[in-house]
Amino acid sequence: DKTVRLWRRSTGELLNTLKGHTDGVLSVCVTADGETVVSGSDDQTVRLWRRSTGELLNTLKGHTDCVTSVCVTADGETVVSGSSDKTVRLWRRSTGELLNTL
């Protein structure tokens, strides 16, 4: 349904529904500090959200096909996205700057 849903693991309570993608969501990860949710979508974007409020922090654009996987480095500084466009992109989490395309 083009959303990311956040649930309380212990009770199954729905905490938040993150809306912003314009096509299906294919991948989600949460930063180690639990503060940021990263999602990848068929809409060719990566979106970063504030977990506690659901606020959209940034939309990373550059892929030319669906984003099938996302993760964040252990230090929390870099978002990594993989796409059906056969590229992996590295982004600076704090600014959304594209750092490298592999």
Image (cartoon, rainbow, N blue to C red):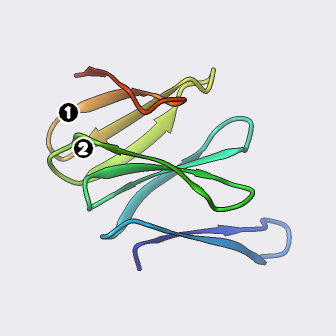
Image x and y of residue 32, in percent: 69, 35
Residue in the picture at 51% in, 31% down: 93
Q: Residue lying furthest right in this view?
A: 10
Within 10 Å of the Cα at label 1, are there few (<14), some (14-19), or many (20+) other Cα atoms?
A: some
Label number found at residue 83: 2
Image x and y of residue 56, in percent: 54, 56
Q: Where is 78 relative to 47, above or below?
A: above
Asked if residue 62 lies left or right of residue 13, the reply is left
Q: How many marks?
A: 2
Image x and y of residue 54, in percent: 64, 62
* Quarter containing the C terminus: top left
Residue in the picture at 24% in, 44% down: 83
**What amino acid type is highlighted by mark number 2?**
Ser
Label number found at residue 87: 1
* Quarter containing the N terminus: bottom left
Out of 68 and 91, give the one closest to the viewer: 91
Residue in the picture at 50% in, 53% down: 28
Q: What separation in Å lies between label 2 and label 1 (alpha carbons)?
A: 6 Å
Q: Where is 12 relative to 55, above or below?
A: below
Q: Where is 74 relative to 71, above or below?
A: above
Q: Tag 2, which secondary structure?
A: strand
Q: Tag 1, which secondary structure?
A: loop
Q: Where is 17 relative to 45, above or below?
A: below
**What amino acid type is highlighted by mark number 1?**
Thr
Label number found at residue 29: none
